[in-house]
């Protein structure tokens, strides 16, 4: 019982923006989840958090409040993250940005049942980077992540430490999300059809689970590790004084050199490692990290809003020297490509069924099936994956098991973004764009690739690939 195009008129306004962002006064001190170095116990459970001041929101988290601890791991070390599922439904953990064996990757088929535990054990062996973790159970990822299950991972190496980038209180882990809060200040997850189309967006922007946050800074260079942990919202990060800042790293680690920008698009799942210079600002200056408008995505980017307020509170002398180079990145050669695959991503209107509003978001016209292997890749092969977006919605495409390099963008933003000069695991494909990435598959086993708009993912915009 598929419906024809005339039914589309019955759908909510697809050109709408979703809920407009409502800025709350930026008066609540920014909070940081505790940092755990090495192994950790992570228990998914419900708890409370004052997302807005004075309101005890009901949330999920891997601690007593929202989100989970920041995990600091050393490349070369073996870690165990014992996961206990205290929810009343299946969950698991995907280590987004860690290169782990397939059986530790949190594939949707590897769930941990309610009340059970699982030790995720692996050796970290990769460049210094900013990663994150979140649940990945089939069709439950969006809700669990939205209600608070997510956390940051920082991978450290001696090589990176030698660069003397800002650290300690000059290094800020920032998980940016948007929440739709009810009268009690609690996040609600009740997606309508329009939310499934555009991604579930909220009116309250949170940083580390705090709405309307401010953070006092000294006259120094700061390192900000930013995770876009939102289900569907893209941010065009900028500073309210329009000053340049430096992108030093992206999903897979540091860039070859610092890239000065005045704005940076960050889609759900992506990370940005930034340097922001407060050293020349007079004490008393107030400055916002904000999101600028941006073109090209029908339903997003039409509103500018503030995210986080900084106030320069303290004069300090800063001896920081901007490194001329950050990391060596070996370019994957197209001469080595064994196979090219092309994926058409977006809506399959033929799948639309008003009785059951599922399965509209597809890859190559297909809705995800846990039982189907969509692609088979030879272990060790280098491949080109081409994502072709002919629809109206942006899609941040994410591959498990490997990092990739962006080769080209056709039909949209024809210049590569600063953060695409490094290793990526999530890449934004705007409406009308065709984005081509190159990667090598070095981990055997079953993995997924999917859109990181979590409503799209849960709706079926995901595939299984087996590497062997
Ligand atoms: Cu961050 Cu498969 O996801
Ligand atoms: Cu999508």
Image (cartoon, grey):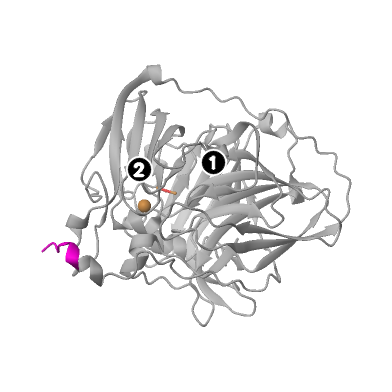
Q: Distance between the residues labelled 2 and 1?
A: 25 Å
- In the rendered image, the vertical position of residue 308 relative to residue 10, given as above or below: above
Outermost residue on the top side: it is 335
In the image, taking residue 31 as reference, residue 144 lies left or right, namely: left
Q: How crowded is mark 1: few (under 14 residues within 10 Å), some or many (20 or more)?
A: some
- Residue 236 rendering spot, x and y as whole percentages: 56, 53
Which residue is identified by label 2?
449
Circle 2 SS class: strand
- In the rendered image, the vertical position of residue 51 relative to residue 101, given as above or below: below
Q: Is residue 68 visible?
A: no
Q: Nearer the viewer, residue 73 or 130?
A: 130
| Earlier sequence position, callout 2 versus callout 1 | 1
Callout 2 touching callout 1 (CB < 8 Å): no
Outermost residue on the bottom side: it is 183
- Residue 116 rendering spot, x and y as whole percentages: 39, 58
Magenta-drawn stretch contains 36? no
Magenta region, residue range: 1-6
Q: How crowded is mark 2: few (under 14 residues within 10 Å), some or many (20 or more)?
A: some
Residue at x 48% of width, y 71% of height: 180
Q: Can residue 259 be seen in this view?
A: yes
- In the rendered image, the vertical position of residue 100 relative to residue 186, given as above or below: above
């Amino acid at each position: 019982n598929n419906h024809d195009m005339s039914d589309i008129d019955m759908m909510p306004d697809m050109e709408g923006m979703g809920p407009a962002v409502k800025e709350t006064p930026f008066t609540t001190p920014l909070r940081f989840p505790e940092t755990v170095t090495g192994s950790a116990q992570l228990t998914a459970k419900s708890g409370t958090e004052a997302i807005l001041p004075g309101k005890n929101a009901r949330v999920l988290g891997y601690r007593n409040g929202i989100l989970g601890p920041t995990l600091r791991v050393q490349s070369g070390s073996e870690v165990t993250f014992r996961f206990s599922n205290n929810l009343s439904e299946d969950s698991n953990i995907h280590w987004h940005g860690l290169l782990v064996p397939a059986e530790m990757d949190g594939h949707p088929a590897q769930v941990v049942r309610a009340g059970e535990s699982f030790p995720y054990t692996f050796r970290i062996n990769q460049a210094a980077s900013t990663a994150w973790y979140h649940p990945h159970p089939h069709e439950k990822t969006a809700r669990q992540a939205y209600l608070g299950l997510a956390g940051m991972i920082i991978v450290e190496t001696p090589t990176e430490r030698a660069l003397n980038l800002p650290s300690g209180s000059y290094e800020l882990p920032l998980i940016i999300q948007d929440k739709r809060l009810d009268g009690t200040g609690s996040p609600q997850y009740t997606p309508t059809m329009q939310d499934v189309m555009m991604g579930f967006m909220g009116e309250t922007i949170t940083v580390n689970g705090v709405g309307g946050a401010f953070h006092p800074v000294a006259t120094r260079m700061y390192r900000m590790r930013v995770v876009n942990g939102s289900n569907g919202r893209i941010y065009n990060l900028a500073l309210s004084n329009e000053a340049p800042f430096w992108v030093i790293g992206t999903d897979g680690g540091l860039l070859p050199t610092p890239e000065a920008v005045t704005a940076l698009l960050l889609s759900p799942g992506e990370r940005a490692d930034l340097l922001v210079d407060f050293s020349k600002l007079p004490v008393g200056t107030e400055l916002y990290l904000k999101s600028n408008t941006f073109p090209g995505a029908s339903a997003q980017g039409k509103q500018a809003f503030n995210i986080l307020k900084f106030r320069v509170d303290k004069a300090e002398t800063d001896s920081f020297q901007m490194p001329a180079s950050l990391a060596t990145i070996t370019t994957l050669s197209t001469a080595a490509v064994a196979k090219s695959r092309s994926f058409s991503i977006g809506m399959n209107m033929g799948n639309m069924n008003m009785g059951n509003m599922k399965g509209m978001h597809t890859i190559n016209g297909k809705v995800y099936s846990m039982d189907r292997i969509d692609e088979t890749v030879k272990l060790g092969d280098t491949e080109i994956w081409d994502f072709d977006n002919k629809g109206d919605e942006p899609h941040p495409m994410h591959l498990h098991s490997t990092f990739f390099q962006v080769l080209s963008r056709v039909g949209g933003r024809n210049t590569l973004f600063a953060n695409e000069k490094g290793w990526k695991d999530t890449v934004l494909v705007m409406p009308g764009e065709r984005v081509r990435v190159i990667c090598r598959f070095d981990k055997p086993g079953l993995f997924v690739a999917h859109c990181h708009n979590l409503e799209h993912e849960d709706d079926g915009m995901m595939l299984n690939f087996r590497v062997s």
